Amino acid sequence: MSLTLFLILCLNGLQYGMLLFLIAAGLTLVFGVMGFINLAHGVQYMVGAYLVFAYTAVTGNFMIAVALSLVTALIFGLLLEFFVFRHLYTRSHLDQVLATFGIIIFLNELAKVLFGPATLSIDPPVFLSGSIQLTETLRYPVYRLMTIGAGLAVALGLYFTVSYTRIGMLIRAGATTPEMISALGVNIKQLFMIVFGVGAMLAGFAGVIAAPIFAIEPGMGDNILIVAFVVIIIGGIGSIGGAFVAALLVGLIDTLGRSLATLFLSFVFNPSFANQIGPALASMLIYLLMAAILVLRPKGLLPAKGVA
């Protein structure tokens, strides 16, 4: 394998990892702070992709469509929290799983009704549609570099918000002692609503920036939700820093593994056998990593302080 191809795979892994982080960050906030299992979080990723497609078709401007999509994703998440999810907080995890799975089915079918079952696509904006020369032999799309930068910006913003602001202090306190901050006069329901809305907007933002790269289709959030759960388990439930490290790790391992597993196996086994088991082994790598982390560090790589 050439160095250029290896660098491309690493950049693709970083870009995939940033998308995973945007989804996992909202998921770990909701799961870690509220103890709520939201299987419908992946649907909010799909909603973001469809929103930017619809708004781009209406406005003809990708950046305006992004802004409108983020606002709509936030409102959509708040409405779901107010009308559906807040009635499930005190229910068992099984009830939460069943209810949110029902929302997955409903919204996937609604997407088929509104946009059809066929896959859709949009082009990146003109000023981000080119490529940039990184090395003498490597040119990389500007838009994909922008997704990496957007993920880094969100990660820094979340870190400083959770660590150094009053709302971040309340979120951390609400994750450990919700009864105490409620007794101090903080509206815990309003706090949880804000957390849920931000989580929904982050998932929607992931769908927005993924829309020009991946196909937009019903059910597109289902598979990535499974990987997002792997990310928060590896990183540590409730930990933004853990989600960031784990997302990058999973993104790189998944991308490099799918390309290198067969190559490495061919050094040990005959090429036909390596071609048979290589792809299967590559798809298992992140789950093997999760299993190893659970054995060595059951709370994750960077567990949040005070979160059980």
Image (cartoon, helix red, strand yellow):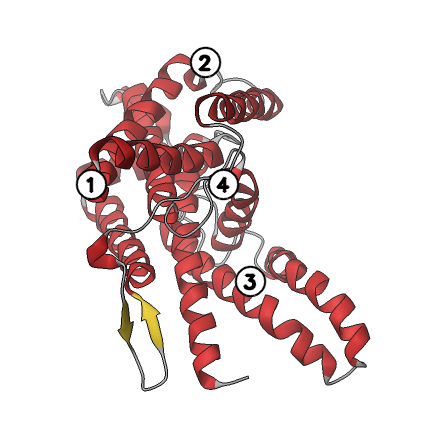
Task: Give the crowd class for mark 4: few <14, some 14-19, many >=20 residues within 10 Å.
Answer: few
Which amino acid, by three-letter code, is at mark 2?
His
**Residue nearest the viewer, comparing 213 with 180:** 213
Residue labelled with disc 2: 87
Residue labelled with disc 3: 254
Looking at the image, do the residues carrying marks 2 and 3 touch, with CB atoms under 8 Å apart?
A: no
Q: If the image is split into quadrants, where does the N terminus sit?
A: bottom right
**Residue 81, image quadrant:** top left
- Please give the name of the residue rendered at 39% of the width and 20% of the height, measured from the top-left corner: 80
Mark positioned earlier in the residue sequence (2 or 3): 2
Circle 4 or circle 1, nearest the eye: 1
Query: Label 3's element?
Result: helix
Task: Give the crowd class for mark 1: few <14, some 14-19, many >=20 residues within 10 Å.
Answer: few
Distance of label 2 from label 3 (alpha carbons): 37 Å
Image coordinates of residue 221 in percent, x first then y, are: 50, 39
Which amino acid, by three-letter code, is at mark 1?
Asn
Image coordinates of residue 94 in percent, x first then y, are: 62, 24
Left or right of 62 in this view: 31: right
**Residue nearest the viewer, comparing 27 with 205:** 205
Residue labelled with disc 4: 308
Mark positioned earlier in the residue sequence (2 or 1): 1
Which numbered marker is on residue 61?
1
Distance of label 4 from label 3 (alpha carbons): 28 Å
Mark positioned earlier in the residue sequence (4 or 3): 3
**Residue nearest the viewer, comparing 153 with 143:** 143
Mark positioned earlier in the residue sequence (4 or 1): 1
Task: Give the crowd class for mark 2: few <14, some 14-19, many >=20 residues within 10 Å.
Answer: few
